[in-house]
Amino acid sequence: MRVSWFCIFGLVVVGPLAGGLTARAADQPQYGQAWGRNMVSTERGLPDRFDPKSGENVKWVAKLGSESHSTPVIAGGRVYLGTNNEEPRDPKHQGDRGVLLCLDEQDGRLLWQLVVPKREEDIFHDWPKSGLSSPATVEGDRVYVVDNRGVVLCLDVHALANGNDGPFRAEGAYMSPRGTNAPAQPLSVGPLDADILWQFDLTAQAGIWSHDAAHSSILIHGDHLYLNTGTGVDHTHKKIRTPAAPSLVVLDKRTGRYLAQDGLGLAPRIFHCTWSSPALARIEGRERLFFAGGDGILYGFEPLAYEAAAREESLGQIRRLKSVWSYDPDPEAPKDEVHRFNGNRATSPSNIYGMPVVEDGLLYLAGGGDWFWGKHEAWLHCVDPQGSGPTPAARRKWSYKLGRHTMSTPAVAGGMVFVADSMRGFHCVDARTGEALWTQELGGEVWGSALVADGKVYVGTRRGDFWVFALSREKKLLHRIELGAPISATPVAANGVLYVGTMTQLLALQVK
């Protein structure tokens, strides 16, 4: 069954970057606002309406492949997003591939691309035509991304145009098909090809089992990278082939060394896959890492201590993150032999696709029955991340019922929470009480999340409709437009421009 991808904008970086690039305060180089992963931007002057046919408020349009599930990130004058290779930009790269595009922020022209062959052993590892679905994370002159083969890559923002920097040097072989389709000689590479600095193969080096596609957003904290592994069931959807696989890993951002993992042994309880990416917040003066596992439970960890990580890295040891908190949003759900409930629309474990969001001292989480294989039940919870009561009810502030399933990460702004569900409903909820303020039938499923920016709320649907609402406790529709292709991604705002990605195009929108 096809996976969902929900990818969002992110962390604000200020100041000069290595390699001569400059980060503007309004760049969005990482998935989610700051550590808390909230879908809220401080951008101003964004359009409340646009029309690609007439050119109204359209800065540029970039053609993508036939499927694009990745949300762009913007940093240092460049736009990064994933797609497939159905519109080849280099004749030497032919056939189904995962592609990470690096585009010029001013006009959308191609600067370089990472092209990665599909995995051949099982289509459920790397679903056909799904492209490269993970969002990139950019810091300085480095781009971090999980490609369609489930490999964590560190890339040079300048690609091979400024030479092949090491220690990784085999870009031609990496971009060449493998297995039965392997060419006699590796592809030749040039300035339009990515420069891979290091790689970490989650399958070979961490022992995971990829399902459908890689779908991880890398969170940077100091010198460490935190990411969900994407481990899950096999093609039968009823078997965990790697029961010892980690769900959350920590790598050294400089070298790709494997430093730590969750150590909770979640794999046997994963109902479908490990969809959710981690978030970080400061709780009671301490940093806490929050992560929704494939078992439907939210966990809190202490971030890896730099000194201990460096010491144990020198010894070649892989640490276990210290688990200090947990919250079960569905305590009555099955916890053992979970795959007995595969396809059961009345009873099943819960699943969490989106990310936890921490805002104003509270944590917001949307989830429910698995969209493809689980029960028809979904909810939005508000949780006290400082709460230490013995039951979920002691930590829960409120619960709001959603329709059937949800893949969205909540957006919290102005005392309101915005979230979509699979019944085509869009909900505005009071952030403190959980009271419904207003709802809207969108006419299409939502695989991404809403963006709040400039007093507006933006959201797209798989039907191809894009909606703009006023940021208000009373419903006010500002604009609706049909874009002619499904929308899987979340809108992004950066440097006065709104980015809307459909399956086939990226639109850069700016008030003229």
Image (cartoon, rainbow, N blue to C red):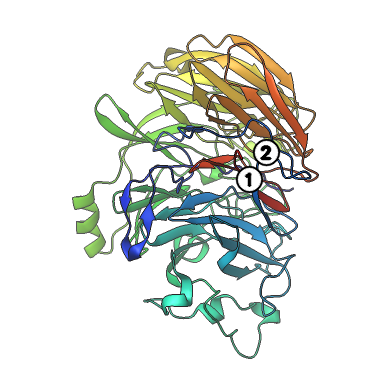
Quadrant in which residue 11 is drawn: top left
Q: Position of residue 438 (x, y in %)?
A: 66, 13
Residue at 58% in and 23% down: 418
Alpha carbon distance from label 1 to label 2: 7 Å
Q: Which residue is mark 2?
A: 447
Q: Nearer the viewer, residue 449 or 383?
A: 449
Q: How many marks?
A: 2
Q: Nearer the viewer, residue 196 or 233?
A: 196
Q: Secondary structure at mark 1?
A: loop
Amino acid type of disc 1?
Trp
| Residue, disc 1 | 5
Task: Tell me the kind of residue under disc 2.
Answer: Trp
Give me the residue at 36% from left, 55% from top. Answer: 22
Q: Residue drawn 64% across and 17% down?
A: 401
Residue 494, relative to residue 109: is it above or below? above
The answer to whether marks 1 and 2 mark residues whose Cβ atoms lie closer than 8 Å is yes
